[in-house]
Amino acid sequence: IMYSKSFVGAFPMITFGPVAVTPSLQGRGIGSLIIQESLKRASKSGYKGVIIQGHPIFYERLGFKYSKLFHISNEMNQYPKGQLVLELQPNALDNVNGSVAFSSVFDIKSDEVEAIEKTLPPKPKFKTRSQEMFELVVGLQADDPYPEDFDPKLCFDNKTPANSSLN
């Protein structure tokens, strides 16, 4: 896992993501173990908090909480459900509040991605149920309820194409 620096006001935090595990190896806890080990190392290195954008259904199991609980908004002063924080040291974020500034490494330009993709062998593009569920969740605010038909199990379905029947 690679971390980058982020800031809430002048307070330094760290960010990681995205995390990926080869599909044939997913569902075995590998991603969780990698994340947990990296968080231990980050804590031992003196970092006090981690802020990420990820799926709450997955990251809450690892101790992450909605950023709203820490009074940390995004750059538009909103509190998206997918913006999550983990204190690496108890009460380390008690006096921290404001909006997060993520590293510019996350400023992805679609034209640059397309240029890189042209250099690679063609590969079919598709969206899975888990990606569809992630898009739904990150569009919600921290206080928004999940839709009535929301099924958390679909958040881990990386094999079924989006919008397909689960018969």
Image: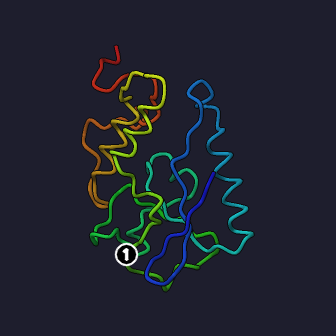
The image shows a total of numbered marks equal to 1
At 53% from the left and 62% from the top, the residue drawn is 15
| Residue 133 shown left or right of residue 9 in the figure | left
Quarter of the image that includes the C terminus:
top left
For the rendered model, the colour scheme is rainbow
- Give the residue displayed 43% in from the left and 22% down from the top: 122
Mark 1: give few (<14), some (14-19) or many (20+) Cα within 10 Å.
some
- Residue hosting label 1: 99
1 vs 51: above or below? above
Give SS at disc 1. strand
Is 165 placed above or below 114 here? above
Figure check: 61 above or below 92: above
Q: Where is residue 111 shown, x and y percent of the image?
A: 33, 45
47 displayed left or right of 105: right
x, y (%) of residue 156?
47, 34
Residue drawn at x 45%, y 46% is 57
State which quadrant residue 143 falls in.
bottom left
Closer-to-camera residue (65/3): 3
Q: Residue at x 33, y 51 (%)?
A: 138
Q: Nearer the viewer, residue 130 or 3?
A: 3
Picture coordinates of residue 146 (x, y %)?
29, 47
Q: Is residue 21 left or right of residue 80?
A: right
Horizontal side of 103 relative to 161 (left or right) equals right
